[in-house]
Image (cartoon, rainbow, N blue to C red):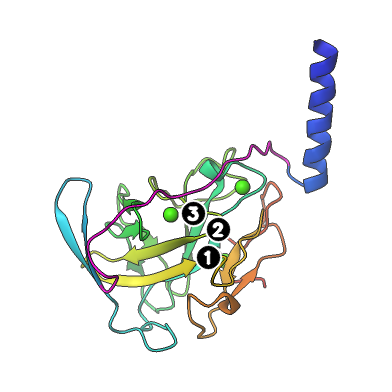
Amino acid sequence: MFITASRSHLLYVAVLALVGCTEPNPAYPGSAPDLDLAGDGSVARASRPDGSMMVIKADSSADSSGAKGSSAIQISEIMANPDCVDDRDGEWIELFNPASHAVNINGWILRDDDDDFHVISADGPLIVPPKGYIVLGRSDDEHDNGGLEVAYAYSDIVLSNHTDEIVLINQSGKVVDSVSYSHGAGFTIPEGASLSFKQQGGAKNNPASWCVEPSPWPGSDGDTGTPGSKPGC
Ligand SMILES: [Ca+2]
Ligand SMILES: [Ca+2]
Ligand SMILES: [Ca+2]
């Protein structure tokens, strides 16, 4: 038994070496269950965890390209399918603040079009610095999340590896930014790499507006991305 287990372990380590990870790599199928939220996408209602209702409005400031006003926080990078760590620990979302003033996103909401729903509830202000980035992830433990520095760990948000949405809603219930990705729309979610929004005025839901990050970030277990900094692709 011992010899068998040792051989299995050696094989496992060899596989890890091949994929370039420094941590174990258990598989986990990221998926979001379905939910029928009221509304047609332009206006919807959602219940907060405390049972109160909020109305979610479409962002009327978005132009035909999908670009938002200069003060809007943007979803700038997505790690939906980490490879070096479990998706339950290693998924993350980076936000960018294009404005010249800091923005506090405590109390804002992350959700998708199904039943993923999270009210950002930090102990104090959660600041996206001017012209700067913030990383939100499923785990803020760098030993579990792939070597990532996370400013805030959310719950109840899963990024599917195939088809999903991320919707960012401010305290007034306004959709500040959103992205919808799917294989059908031409998106390919890479394994072990993030997608960065190139921020060149492209539409958020156009796969051509996104690029696959090629290099590991400092401290990464091996997965690639630029969490907390500008796109590298
Ligand atoms: Ca994965
Ligand atoms: Ca989801
Ligand atoms: Ca980045």
Relative image position of residue 99 (x, y in whole percent) = 40, 79
Residue at 72% in and 62% down? 215
Q: Position of residue 39 (x, y in %)?
A: 23, 67
Residue type at mark 3: give it. Leu
Quadrant where the N terminus is found in the figure? top right
Do residues under tags 1 and 3 come within 8 Å of each other at their CB atoms? no
Q: CA distance from mark 1 to mark 2?
A: 6 Å
* Label 3 lies in ligand 2 vicinity (Cβ under 8 Å): yes
* Picture residue at 39% right of the left edge, 45% below the top: 155
Q: Is the residue marked by circle 1 packed among few (<14), some (14-19), or many (20+) residues within 10 Å?
A: some
Residue 29 belongs to magenta span: yes
Can you tell which quarter of the image residue 27 is in?
top right
- Highlighted range, magenta: 22-42
SS at circle 1: loop
- Asked whether the viewer can see residue 229, the reply is no
- The tag on residue 159 is 3
User: Mark 1 or mark 3: which is in front?
Assistant: 1
Marking on residue 172: none
Mark 2 and mark 3 in contact? Answer it, CB < 8 Å.
no
| Image side of residue 16 versus residue 108, left or right | right
Residue 162: give its label.
2
Residue type at numbered disc 1: Ser
Q: Position of residue 53 (x, y in %)?
A: 15, 56
